[in-house]
Image: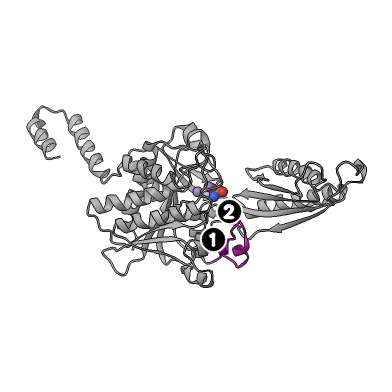
Amino acid sequence: MLLILVTFKLNTKYMSRLNVALFFFGCITIIAQKPKVDQTRLENRILELAQFGLQENGETERVAFSDADVAAQHWVVQKLKDLGLQVHIDFAGNVIGKREGKSSTLKSISFGSHIDRVPNGGNYDGCLGSMASLEVLEVLNENKITTKHPLEIIIFSNEEGGVMGSRAIAGHLGKDALKVVNSTGYSMGEGIMRLGGDTTRIAKVARKKNEIAAFLELHIEQGGTLENENIQIGTVEGIVGLKWWDVEFTGFSNHAGTTPMNARQDALLAAAKFIVSVNEITNSFDGAQVGTVGKIKAEPGAPNVIPGKVVTSLEIRDLSSEVIEKVYQAIKTKGEEIAEASNVQIEFRALDTTADPAIMTSSIQDAIGASAEKLGLSTKKMPSGAGHDAQDMALIAPTGMIFVPSQGGISHSPKEFTSAEDMANGANVLLHTILALDKKLD
Ligand code: HGY
Ligand code: MN
Ligand code: MN
């Protein structure tokens, strides 16, 4: 910088006014963009984290509570300790790391994401926000920056199985939620104990409203909007709500060779018709709601036995809780008609994993947009069709989310990909938004 200034002094008399203006603009831009994250270090951390649960056939297995999830959690704890943070695992299994601020009275600025994955998921969903949060702390350390506010990193537990850790922090993880079992075979209650939490004291994890000054989450978009429009940063305006049900069909298991076609109570046949109807009914309403059956289990599960029992999942999402309810009621009515016509019973059981729609705080959206602009990155406001821990944090703190492009709009798949440059862009926006909020908030 000194060299540039000397050069500038020597050449001033030969420079036009326009050049001078451009020169100053350049200097200001360079200064405004500092500090910056280390793109290679961030990418390497993502690749290191990706090793946890990687199978020989290339598939990934790091569903919450699995051995790989627990091992990855221990790895993150060590990384945060190496960065000099005070680290603990709370009673809900969340990893919490704290960095002191200059003020002992100000509330913390918190940020983070999750490291658990859907079965055979990708390397970026949740992992980017988690590793970028580590990178932000590392850059602050390197630049010897102490913020006024204390900083807090949160790596939330079991995001993919019902935003468990953030619901506990927001104070609405109900007792029924602890009974929900994921693909590892562990219930949330058992899983919390595996992660070093304690279900008997989980209520203590809940924070008071506005106990946190602001919460930020960086995440991959998981859709194709940013890539298609060639935009580097998305500022999330709102996050869809989502509800899950188990739908159980009870028929009668009987011999597949001797039971005539007109005398069957085939639970799987009824379930098949139901699955088609979920798609048709969800499509029949105007709007952007989505409805999915993503899981099915038929019993007893043999080629020569008529299935007597089937359980499917049902998930509905929308930015409005009323729309979710309206679509659900239509699906339920149709399901009951199908069951009656198929001579089977049907039961809908709502799971305690509901995430309500959430609007992101407008002042935080503005801070994200301004940081992106300062860094010279293109940006747009957009909704999130995926659920996130930020939506529960929004119940108790001013909250914002930063999106970066997902290649091909692919997510919840091993093909999920975000370039190192896009990841670094997002991490820089996270860093500069934290610094801007640190200046602005009291
Ligand atoms: O399912 C979701 O929307 C999120 O990725 N957990
Ligand atoms: Mn996900
Ligand atoms: Mn996620």
- Residue 390's tag is none
- Disc 1, SS: helix
Q: Residue at x 79, y 49 (%)?
A: 335
Q: Give the range drawn in magenta.
A: 172-190
Circle 1 residue: 191
Residue 118 image point, x, y percent: 55, 47
Circle 2 residue: 184
Alpha carbons under labels 2 and 1: distance apart: 9 Å
The overriding secondary structure of the stretch rendered in magenta is loop
> Is 31 a magenta residue?
no
Instruction: Determine contact: label 2, label 1, CB under 8 Å.
Output: yes
Residue 203 image point, x, y percent: 51, 71
- Disc 2, SS: loop
Which quarter of the image is occupied by the C terminus? bottom left
Q: Which residue is drawn at 39% across and 44% down?
A: 48
Give the mark nearer the N terminus: 2 vs 1.
2
> Is 189 a magenta residue?
yes
